[in-house]
Image (cartoon, coloured by chain):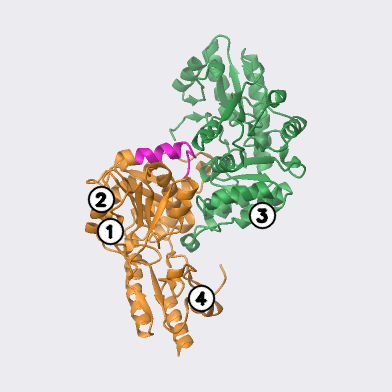
Chain colours: A green, B orange
Amino acid sequence: MQTGLIKINTNESPFSPTPAVQRAIRDAVNSDLRLYPDPNAFLLRQAISQAHGVNIDEVFVGNGSDEVLGHAISALMDHGAPVLLPDITYGFYQIWCALYGIDFKLIPLNADFDIETDDYRQAAGGIIIANPNAPTGRFLSVQQITGLLELHPGRVLIVDEAYGDFCDQSAVQLIQHFPNLLVTRTFSKSRALAGMRIGYALGQKPLIEGLERVKGCFTPYPVDRLAQIAGAAAIADPNYREQIDAIVSERIRLSDTLLALGFDVVPSSANFILTRHPKLPGIDLYNALRRRDILVRHFSTPRLQTYIRITVGTTAQMGQLAKTLTDLLF
Amino acid sequence: MQTGLIKINTNESPFSPTPAVQRAIRDAVNSDLRLYPDPNAFLLRQAISQAHGVNIDEVFVGNGSDEVLGHAISALMDHGAPVLLPDITYGFYQIWCALYGIDFKLIPLNADFDIETDDYRQAAGGIIIANPNAPTGRFLSVQQITGLLELHPGRVLIVDEAYGDFCDQSAVQLIQHFPNLLVTRTFSKSRALAGMRIGYALGQKPLIEGLERVKGCFTPYPVDRLAQIAGAAAIADPNYREQIDAIVSERIRLSDTLLALGFDVVPSSANFILTRHPKLPGIDLYNALRRRDILVRHFSTPRLQTYIRITVGTTAQMGQLAKTLTDLLF
């Protein structure tokens, strides 16, 4: 990484994996690396099941939640009707649909960038949402998710909770009640392990078995030995709570700073903020910050092009950002 | 792993990753794990390109050669005619074909378990062979591979060299002459890194671009940070030569031992031997060894059911195997 660059463009954690996690990985660098990993990733799935209070056969793991989502879209969507997606969300959902020849339909977010659950009351081969959504940071309550699940009892709803640790509700509690719910999660954000590629899905056993069938036809060992160990250590480590709380506090401070500088701020429940300034178009803000060694994200899609998305970083990084924005604007 | 068990059933290396490789991995367990890996795996691809004397844009890497092969079958086979495969080979080729809806046709090995290249002189959407083949260990020369490439200039030949380091020829030298050749390789066997899931493909740029397109629609970060570092260190480390030579020497000794005990031995160019004994059916041999804490592989397919496959291990492991077989037979 470029020295001095403040990289707040891909929603990684600004913190390190905890000492216990780093130690667990280092201790596993030994002769056993010559052996294939456990294809069933038992210890990792057990740790995840304990952390969420679900059964181990309700847990599926993969090489990042990207692989998990790819398998889920391949295995669990009904081809009789289009899969429904928000028009603004994680861009890969429609790429996977296209890869697997699955018809999809984009449902516009409302003017506040919120998902209107009533708009999903139409023929659906399944629904995929990110919650909190990206890059908006907007959040559906557990009641709203329940509403979506009840709209299409025979179709699978995938709730991608990549940013779930940064808000105070999760759809995981609904799994026991809804056989059509799959929740995906990742170690790449709140667990500071984007470099290790670990993701998972939680759902009732028949959905997990569907994922296992696709995985079994693709690669039997998707999660390597060190990733299995890192994930098991990370999900069991209470010290991540402090990192997550710090990110949430910093998000609130960043939001206040941006508002004080005259920005429009989309209220966020994730580890990033979508924001725009009435005086500076998004691309100009992006370029001005880039020239000052601050890398944020700009989207060229029409509804987002006036905005930038800022990943919440450390207090020092956010201080530098605030100072730079102030210099730019005044 | 069970203590005392001699695990010679999945063709892993009996040796450890070298000290330099283990050190490189340990040194990379740091704060950077919070960041996504390089999606282009530049340093790993550069190390592979240097080791093989090819251009970096002729190298594709993935999460084990399983993922690489899956993408290759999805991206590079022509759907106008069946893909040709040996009837006895790595079992996943036909599973990937089925997963991607690709018609395939099994071409029987001859009575000596050899691939008869003339049998591939028929309509083909592509050809996939393992060389050396598994679980036979039989090998096609570079001339024979050239013959296959010339049979179908407009179709891709995938040569899976998972065991290529254990024999003295490779099809990699043919890449510059044949735009229809893709060679896949792995770090799971000769490099003692099955636990890290690293595989790669070598071929002319248009084939590699085809693989990149599929990868780009599936997951942008298939190879994690530690795997990229492990692979780059391993392919550049000359100390693996000693491990590979030891395995080849031990294979020759094991073959002699088996012949002396009255076994039929299929001559092998890999790190395993397919063998049978006229007095003991394969499943009985498998079970008798299993009861004595030696785990070999048995296949239930008709042409292989009288055989067992033994992974070449350390001198000590092979000594224990020889002693146990002698006890069983005399």
The residue under label 2 is which amino acid type?
Leu
**Residue under numbered circle 4:** B283
The answer to whether marks 4 and 2 sit on the same chain is: yes
> Is residue B39 among the parts visible in the rendering?
no
Between discs 2 and 1, the one toward the N terminus: 1
Distance from Cα at disc 4 to Cα at disc 2? 39 Å
SS for callout 4: helix
The residue under label 1 is which amino acid type?
Thr
Chain under disc 2: B
Q: Quadrant of the C terminus of chain B?
A: bottom left
Q: Residue at x 24, y 46 (%)?
A: B178
The answer to whether marks 2 and 1 sit on the same chain is: yes
SS for callout 2: helix
Q: Are marks 4 and 1 in contact (CB under 8 Å)?
A: no
The answer to whether marks 3 and 1 sit on the same chain is: no
Distance from Cα at disc 2 to Cα at disc 3? 51 Å
Q: Can you say whether A79 is above or below A207 in the image? A: above
**Residue under numbered circle 1:** B117
Can you tell which of label 3 and label 1 is closer to the viewer? 1
Can you tell which of label 4 and label 2 is closer to the viewer? 2
Q: Nearer the viewer, residue A146 or A266?
A: A146
User: What numbered label is drawn on residue A46?
Assistant: 3
Q: Can you say whether A261 is above or below A99 in the image? A: above
Chain under disc 4: B
Q: Position of residue B6 (x, y in %)?
A: 50, 73
Q: Can you say whether B309 is above or below A246 in the image? A: below
